[in-house]
Amino acid sequence: MTEEPIKKQRKPEELPFVAPCRQITVGAPINWLKLGWKDIKRAPKQSLSYGLVVLLLSYLISYVAWEVGSVYLLIAMLSGFVFIGPVLAIGLYSISKQIQHGYTPQLGYCIRQERRHLDNELVIAFILMIVLLVWARAASTIHIFFPDNNSADIADFAVFLAVGSVVGSIFATVVFCASAFSLPMIMDKQADAVTAVLSSINAILRNKAAMLVWALLIVLLLLVSFATALLGLVVLMPLIGHATWHGYKEVIDASEWPDYKKTEC
């Protein structure tokens, strides 16, 4: 039996600017959710504890937005969850990676791993935070289209919903393209933020149909969470996070980028 040749590790300056991607089927995101659910069952305490922290953080943000702002700011901050969600899920990617390497997931390791990637994570987090703040401002401006008189009809409400949906979709699309796979790649490989973001955008552009399905599934799960007064986040946030990790592993071919030692996951 012949041994497989060991792939020579390329120097950082020799690496491509964008990681190549694989073509996936339209139904691939459904399988990601199934794999994500398996991760939850393998590490229920760690995953659900993470989801509980996200829930409490969401309640805190909602409370502050309500106290210092208005109902429009509250709605903007809750809808802005789409923008900060990828950053909040970083620890979940770590849990999935630990499971992949055969380790018993530990939240303490997740924190240490996040600190190790802190520089690149902060770059992406800063970008997403700017987008969130701009969206909050835009959302508070859009409320001028909200009918505030008793004679308003369905057409007036339709205009408000149409304008809000269009503007929100533009912001959400930008964030989705930049963050869909960038943070999992940073967690997995020694890749910089620019390469990770461009790799994420490239993968989405080459798998538009499948990634549209994935985006719709995320929106659906978030709507379920909102319908349960955010309580659904305890389970659905870990589910989305773990599924995103499996999506990254299937779509992005980051084999040329240096990995971390197996003892570090």
Image: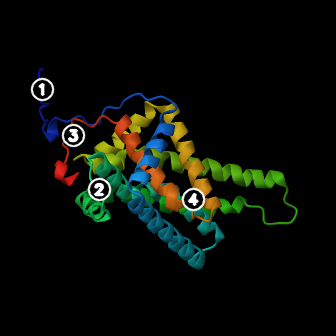
Q: Which residue is mark 1?
A: 5
Image location (x, y in percent) of residue 141: 62, 62
Up/down of 227 relative to 258, above or below? below
Q: Are marks 1 and 2 in contact (CB under 8 Å)?
A: no
- Please, what is the three-letter code of the amino acid marked with disc 3? Trp
Asked if residue 82 lies left or right of residue 112, the reply is: right
How was this image coloured?
Answer: rainbow
Q: CA distance from mark 4 to mark 1?
A: 49 Å
Quarter location, residue 229: bottom right
Marks 4 and 3: which is nearer the front?
3
* Crowd class of label 2 (few under 14; some 14 to 19; many from 20; radius 10 Å): few
Image location (x, y in percent) of residue 30: 51, 38
Q: Which residue is mark 3?
A: 257
Q: Which residue is mark 4?
A: 79
Up/down of 28 relative to 101, above or below? above
Q: Are marks 4 and 3 in contact (CB under 8 Å)?
A: no
Q: Which quadrant would the N terminus be assigned to in this image? A: top left
Image location (x, y in percent) of residue 50: 42, 63
Q: CA distance from mark 3 to mark 1?
A: 17 Å
Residue 104 disc label: 2
- Please, what is the three-letter code of the amino acid marked with disc 4? Ser
* Crowd class of label 1 (few under 14; some 14 to 19; many from 20; radius 10 Å): few
Marks 2 and 4: which is nearer the front?
2
* Crowd class of label 3 (few under 14; some 14 to 19; many from 20; radius 10 Å): some
Q: Are marks 4 and 1 in contact (CB under 8 Å)?
A: no
- Marked residue nearer the N-terminal end (1 or 2): 1
* Crowd class of label 4 (few under 14; some 14 to 19; many from 20; radius 10 Å): many
Up/down of 143 relative to 259, above or below? below
